């Protein structure tokens, strides 16, 4: 197994508990900026800033371009979501990812335009974690890239603070980001660390996750907490004996695995659960907070090995 150098190793940081995610210096780490961790950590100033910025971006995208179906201008707006290689995150282990790009801009626009909740102007689709969960075509990598681009200035500020803390040399460069005040893309000069002529931006570790398919988790959550209860209460009529196990004392217990296998829905149909089970999105968000934590050191070690 080839030993891959990390950011901390290269810049001489000896602590194993840095606030930033310890990325690989030359390769991409299969990790992502996770909008659920952002939404679930609003007591943190940086999480709150990222949440409000991404919400402003999605509101502008949906109201100005998606709902009126202004595809041409919408694609121009999304074209600013370029390469985010400075984060060293995503599926491309050789750090040659394309970010959103022109093709993915079309996917993002068309995916949102096809979503019934977005077309109806439902405000939950102005929140990044709900878009990730409910909009077919927008996956973990696309959403992470979107957040990286939209919030680049915020994360650049965080990176500079980390560099000052660990006495890492920085160089001035110009970056692009979404300005929520003007609702337009803008540029500014920032100071960032460099490696082989390319600048690096760090992200807080507690706002990241590894590969995670929230569609599957939400299906299971709805099956266990809503559908199973409706079956036991007789609200959902079924002749399928595999859904309920009756114990010797007459107690009936739902067999979640079988219920989920039968009732689970693909991503584009999850809005049916949102409508049927009011409050399930908020309950699921709380569930994520307690059951699906951010990346820890042990998980990072596994990802380093996978990247090699």
Image (cartoon, rainbow, N blue to C red):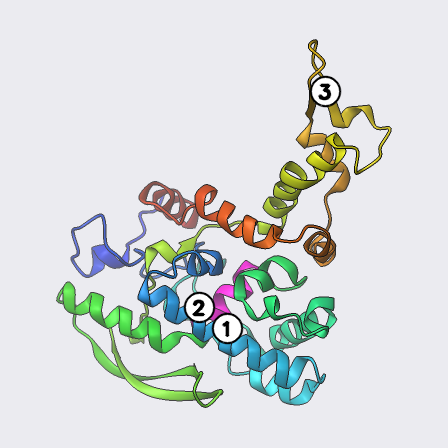
Can residue 149 be seen here? The reply is no
Q: Residue at x 21, y 59 (%)?
A: 10
Instruction: Tell me the residue that label 2 is attached to.
Output: 51
The stretch of residues the image draws in magenta is: 139-148
Left or right: residue 173 compared with residue 290: left
Image spot of residue 158 (x, y percent): 28, 69
- Between 117 and 101, the one lying in front of the other is 117
SS at badge 2: helix
User: For mark 1, what is the residue?
Assistant: 55
Q: In which quarter of the image is the N terminus?
A: top left
Sequence order check, earlier mark of 2 and 3: 2
Instruction: Name the main secondary structure of what is drawn in magenta.
Output: helix
Q: Is mark 1 on a helix, strand or loop?
A: helix
Q: State the residue position of label 3.
A: 245
Q: Residue 30, percent across and down?
A: 45, 54
- Could you tell me if the residues under marks 2 and 1 are in contact, i.e. CB atoms within 8 Å? yes
At a point 32% along the width and 56% down the height, the residue shown is 21
């Amino acid at each position: 197994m080839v030993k891959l150098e990390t950011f901390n190793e290269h810049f001489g940081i000896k602590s194993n508990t840095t606030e930033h995610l310890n990325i690989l210096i030359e390769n991409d780490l299969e990790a992502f900026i996770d909008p659920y961790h952002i939404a679930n950590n609003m007591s943190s100033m940086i999480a709150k800033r990222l949440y409000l910025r991404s919400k402003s971006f999605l509101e502008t995208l949906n109201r100005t371009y998606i709902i009126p179906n202004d595809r041409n201008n919408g694609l121009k707006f999304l074209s600013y979501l370029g390469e985010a290689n400075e984060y060293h995150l995503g599926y491309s282990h050789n750090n040659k990812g394309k970010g959103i790009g022109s093709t993915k801009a079309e996917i993002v626009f068309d995916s949102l335009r096809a979503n019934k909740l977005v077309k109806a102007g439902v405000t939950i689709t102005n929140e990044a974690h709900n878009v990730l969960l409910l909009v077919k075509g927008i996956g973990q990598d696309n959403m992470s890239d979107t957040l990286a681009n939209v919030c680049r200035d915020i994360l650049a500020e965080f990176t500079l603070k980390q560099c000052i803390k660990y006495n890492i040399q920085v160089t001035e460069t110009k970056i692009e980001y979404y300005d929520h005040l003007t609702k337009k893309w803008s540029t500014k000069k920032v100071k960032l660390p460099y490696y082989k002529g390319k600048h690096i931006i760090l992200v807080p570790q507690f706002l990241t996750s590894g590969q995670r398919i929230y569609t599957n988790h939400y299906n299971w959550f709805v099956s266990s907490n809503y559908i199973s209860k409706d079956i036991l209460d007789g609200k959902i009529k079924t002749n399928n004996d595999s859904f309920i196990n009756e114990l010797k004392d007459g107690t009936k217990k739902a067999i979640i695995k079988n219920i989920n296998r039968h009732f689970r829905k693909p991503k584009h149909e999850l809005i049916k659960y949102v409508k049927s089970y009011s409050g399930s999105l908020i309950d699921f968000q709380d569930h994520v907070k307690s059951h699906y934590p951010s990346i820890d050191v042990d998980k990072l070690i596994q990802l380093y090995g996978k990247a090699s």
